[in-house]
Amino acid sequence: MSADVTTAVVETTALEAVYGTGDGVGPVDLRIEPGQSVLVLGPSGSGKSTLLRMLHGAVPLAVHAQVDGEVRVAGRSVAGTGIAGLADVVGVVGQDPESGVCLPDVLDEVAFPLENLAVDPALIGPAVRTALDRAGASGLAGRATAELSGGELQRVALAAAIAPSPRLLLLDEPTSMLDADGIDAVRHALDVVRRETGAACVLVEHRLDELAGDAGAAALPDRWIVLGKDGRVRHDVAVDALTVPVLRELVGEGCWLPLDLELRALLGEGGALSGGALPQGALLPSDYARKQPRSGPNDEVEAHIAGGDESLAARLLRELGRGDGGAWSRGALLPSRYARKQPDSGPNDGVETHIAGAGESLAARMLRELGRDVAPASDVAPVPAPDVAPHPAPSDAPTLRANALAVARGPRGRRREVLRGVDLELRPGTTTALVGANGSGKSTLLACLAGLDRPAAGSVEGPRAGLVFQNPEHQFTATTVRQEVAHGLPPDAAPRVEQALARFGLTRLADHNPYRLSGGQKRRLSLAAMLVHEHPFLLADEPGFGLDRHASVGVLRALRDAAAAGRGVLFSSHDLRAVAGYADRVLVLADGTLLADTTPLDLLRDEALLASAGLRPPALLRALACEVRDAQDLVGVLRAMDDTALALGVAA
């Protein structure tokens, strides 16, 4: 059946889905034209993935739900055509790329959709190579899919989705496990496919700042569809029409935003976005700008910084940071009218009650000096400085050690080293981050430390550690959320189970099937189920995967609390902002080798180490690394921004 190229790519009418649990999404009325790019965002559990699945029939044809309304893709009724009947016009990258892998070889995997569409065999090879190149996955050709990391699988999944040149691309968090190069590849691939084929794209994504890069919101889809916690469409708006109240609502709901929009949400600039991206150099001191190359697309950004004036990042640090009393003003970015909305008591008092005053906020000054009008904002009462030091453990506390650890993968004759001679020691009371590019060996190292992967050489010494898997479903064993958290605990641990459910926002889902949760809910469940146990060491593989901002901050604080209670914590992450704000120590992996054992601030200031490891900090971290005096300054600013975002949620 040929596609009608004159009609809308997607049309929905009163489209609504309700699961047996009562959760759902809709009603949704959409019209998406050829070549249009749409971003779907909302808090975890708002129905974003369900909406994408309805657009290609997976809900209800593969995942049962009560669906009402109509959806048509390229003029075809999804209900009447079925999933297979849409394969020639729809490309899909699912939230869990591993679940979509069909074949053992990368080249065969990318060729598979072309073969299913009976493409001329002579054309398949070139199409596969082109797709791999666009997805930044050319180096994976010839690899076994079972050997790939989560991020590498995401690149392969993207290549397979774009290989047939579909008219509609549906992408569910395609950058969630990717490093900076992988995110660049996704952005490039989507631009090329839209330009050359006219395909429409519907994207669900949390990591908007990384996807946007230094260009800010201008690099993101120009149409945003915002779902609320109830699954209903709150906004369907052009990005250049986003107002400060809407941006504050998004932050309050837990949505991550690119830095330029995050600052507008926190600062209170009046009116619609009119100036495009916040200039990336605006946060940087002039001596840093002079180090930058003076040719290429960023000339305009770099050239505007001159003289010896105080940088905007310095003002951010000074006005948001510690005052004369050595305390932090965590809410300094919020206007005073938000303080009056805070409750007088409750579990979030530390976030809610510190906002007061009537002075101009630093963020407002930042935008004003960039030539933008801003609304008045507030000073705030100081709160205690953040605790950034590791919590010392007793001298006789056990440690977890890796000695000359080596791991190899692949069949004989094609084996490749995944880890080479890794030596490390984890100490109780310390939160350690593990960073590195895709395929650097992070997940393998965590599995070895947990005793789930046998090394080819070397040894692991110390108590058994608990591990939170990169894919939450791999650790589920029970049929309800409550049973999953309680698994392996004695009956008298019921109060601990209920506390864990409450802490991770799972109480209302306690009787639900773990496999029917959203991706973010599954991640929260996997963390709750491991933290409730009293392992002396806790290992977490990408704990922020699939989480909105509120849930991500909650998880990071839970890991910090575990360390404060004397447990050793090691978590892997591509989110350098999370690493800088919540880790005491950083282990840097590259090609299976431990390059460095350092601190977050030292890592951000070591350009050679960042380049060797394939790491690229976002603009905010680059700016702060130039300005802060010490780790306490860095952590204070980052956690203050998180606290302010949480306070917006309470005020909403």
Image: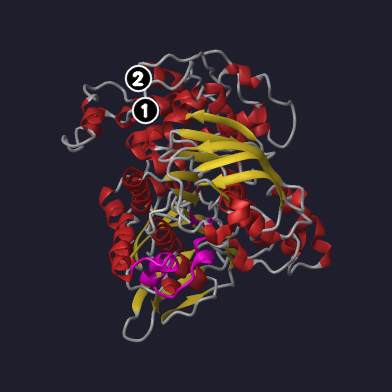
Which residue was labeled with disc 2? 370
Which residue was labeled with disc 1? 278
The kind of residue on which mark 1 rests is Leu
* Residue at 34 percent of width and 77 percent of height: 416
SS type, badge 2: loop
The circle drawn on residue 191 is none
Q: Quadrant of residue 156?
A: bottom left
Q: Is residue 570 above or below residue 605?
A: below
Mark 2 and 1 residues: CB-CB less than 8 Å, in contact? yes
Place of residue 247 in the rendered image (x, y in percent of width and height, measured from the top left): 53, 28
* Residue at 45 percent of width and 73 percent of height: 103
Q: Pick whichever of labels 2 and 1 is earlier in the sequence.
A: 1
* Residue at 40 percent of width and 51 percent of height: 599
Label 1 Cα neighbours within 10 Å, binned few <14 / some 14-19 / many ≥20:
many
SS type, badge 1: loop
Q: Quadrant of residue 165?
A: bottom left
Q: Is residue 152 above or below residue 500?
A: below
Indicate left or right for 42 with 304 as reference: right
Quarter of the figure that contains the C terminus: top right
Place of residue 462 in the rendered image (x, y in percent of width and height, measured from the top left): 54, 73
The kind of residue on which mark 2 rests is Leu
Q: Which residues are magenta?
A: 92-120
